[in-house]
Amino acid sequence: MAVTDRVKPRSAGCPPLPPADTKGVRRLAFSQQASKWDVKVSPYLYISPFFILFALTGLFPLVYTAWVSLHNWNLIGGQGKFTGLENYAFVVAQPYFWNAVGNTFSIFILSSVPQVVIALVIAAVLDANLRARTFWRMGVLVPFVVAPVAVGLIFNNLFADQFGLINEMLKAAGLDPVRWHSDSVASHLAIASMVNFRWTGYNALIFLAAMQAIPRDVFEAATIDGAGRLRQFFSVTVPMLRPTVIFVVITSTIGGLQIFDEPRVFDQSGLGGADRQWQTLTMYIWELGWGQRNFGRASAVAWLLFLIIVLIALLNFLITKRIASQGGRK
């Protein structure tokens, strides 16, 4: 008997087999595929707002400034002819540009170095068992929330050449008054004091947060070994704050090279003194763009400042990376 003979045909009264649910299978496959896409794409969607805002407020202005720097761009006439690197060559040949570079680095060094050291000391004091610790920790942040213009007006009166509080105190001590608005070094010290007044407390709170994260067992072990508070600070606290110190140094460098508010309000002309004694690069950009109405040259200076900041940041990164690697080997 053949195999086909054993297969009985369906009788006419039996119900037909239900059709295959192809739509359900497709829906299941689509949901599985959508789940895979969700796992892969969702993290990028969560962080996309930052990159969108950065592209609109950071990347686009940077690229557009580079485009403007390559043209003869006037505030009134708008875009002119393409000039290539002519704006850069003109700016580099100007003595005012190099004067602004020297003033910027001078004010940056006089402000950033003492700022980091004083912030470390203040953070160590706030980390101790003080009465009303919350009050003191909030108090160091008060100068940061004060408007830069208000700080400039206050310090402008303190460092006034005539009848200023600082000069009056020097006269009372039998010393000659200082020409804060005429001498370059004196003006840089006055502006650096304004910067330190605003940002030292902010950096102190960053150091304080890092100190709070250090395990207290380390200090207890150092105390058992006979280390005093000063020895613990230099041998335990500072080495364990190395990543935070690196962060503060890099951010202070970027902010110090872009300083504008404090030197701008130190006098009323806005040019950095009669002989541009404290004119910074950002003030020089403002003068070219809004004073001389030449956006092409102002954009060229802005891009030169950007390149200087990148080079300094890379140098800081290499130095701090080497220090960190040496600390790890130790």
Image (cartoon, rainbow, N blue to C red):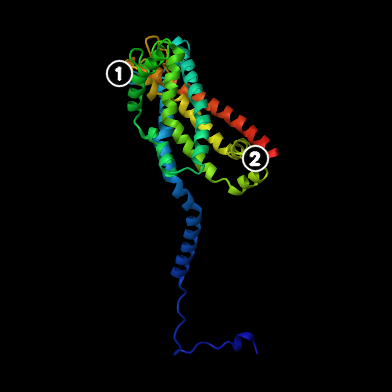
Q: Is residue 94 visible to the viewer in this orientation of the structure?
A: no
Q: Residue, x 49% and y 63% (percent of image)?
A: 32
Q: Residue, x 60% and y 36% (percent of image)?
A: 230
The spot of residue 159 in percent (x, y) is 37, 18
Q: 58 or 186: which is nearer to us? A: 186
Q: Is residue 156 left or right of residue 213?
A: left
Q: Which mark is residue 77?
A: 1
Q: Residues within 10 Å of mark 2 (few under 14, many from 20)?
A: some
Q: Residues within 10 Å of mark 1 (few under 14, many from 20)?
A: few
Mark 2 sits on what residue? 227
Label 2, secondary structure: give it. loop
The spot of residue 48 in percent (x, y) is 44, 45
Q: Image height check: is 200 above or below 299?
A: below
Marker count (numbered):
2
For the residues labelled 1 and 2, the Cα–Cα distance comes to 70 Å
Mark in the foreground, 1 or 2: 2
Q: Residue, x 46% and y 62% (percent of image)?
A: 30
Tag 2: residue type?
A: Ala
Q: Earlier in the sequence, mark 1 or mark 2?
A: 1
